[in-house]
Image (cartoon, rainbow, N blue to C red):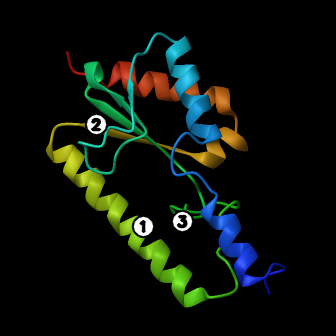
Amino acid sequence: MDNRSKEARSRNMSHIPSKDTKPEEYVRKSLFSRGFRYRKNVSSLPGKPDIVLPKYKTVVFVNGCFWHAHKDCPWFVPPKTNTDFWTAKFQYNTARDCRNYVKLADMGWRVIIVWECEIRHGDKNSRLDRLEYQIRNEYDT
């Protein structure tokens, strides 16, 4: 059972940002300090990627574990109320994400996903090192 009223929960959920989240900012600052230059939230690309690295033909999505239903993640806990709505919402979000990733790949973009839990709860430096490696070493000149 939710410990908040329906109105209070709705107000809380409506204040969650869709861009410029703390994990996104952390990843962007790390990439910038490592010499990468990028564009943010490019609306002309499918899915409006969080980070676009045109030089490397690579996009990075920093996905929240809750909203993108991160499978087998201990930080993704589906709500216990209004389960039909949330199940449909998560299925729609994941299907939309997959469609966007395929469209981007068909356009020649490489898609990298960084999960919120990797930045907030994991070894973030290790993940950012791996992200740098993915960008630099999988780039075809």
Instruction: Look at mark 1 in the image and give the residue it sits on.
Output: 93
Q: Are marks 3 and 2 in contact (CB under 8 Å)?
A: no
Q: Residues within 10 Å of mark 3 (few under 14, many from 20)?
A: many
Q: Nearer the viewer, mark 1 or mark 3?
A: 1
Q: Are marks 1 and 2 in contact (CB under 8 Å)?
A: no
Q: What numbered label is drawn on residue 110?
A: 2
Q: Are marks 1 and 3 in contact (CB under 8 Å)?
A: yes
Q: Is residue 91 above or below residue 128?
A: below
Q: Residues within 10 Å of mark 2 (few under 14, many from 20)?
A: many
Q: Is residue 4 above or below residue 57?
A: below
Identify the residue at horizontal 63%, vertical 42% (top origin): 118
Q: Secondary structure at mark 2?
A: strand
For the residues labelled 1 and 2, the Cα–Cα distance comes to 20 Å
Q: Position of residue 40 (x, y in %)?
A: 41, 32
Q: Is residue 23 above or below residue 136?
A: below
> The residue under label 2 is which amino acid type?
Arg
- Residue 37 at least partly seen: yes
Front residue of 125 and 82 = 82
Of callouts 3 and 2, the N-terminal one: 3
Q: Position of residue 41 (x, y in %)?
A: 39, 39
Of callouts 1 and 3, the N-terminal one: 3
Q: Position of residue 111 (x, y in %)?
A: 33, 41
Q: Nearer the viewer, mark 1 or mark 2?
A: 1
| Quarter of the rendering containing residue 135 | top left
Q: Secondary structure at mark 1?
A: helix
Identify the residue at horizontal 48%, vertical 29% (top origin): 131
Front residue of 101 and 86 = 86
For the residues labelled 3 and 2, the Cα–Cα distance comes to 22 Å
Instruction: Look at mark 3 in the image and give the residue it sits on.
Output: 69
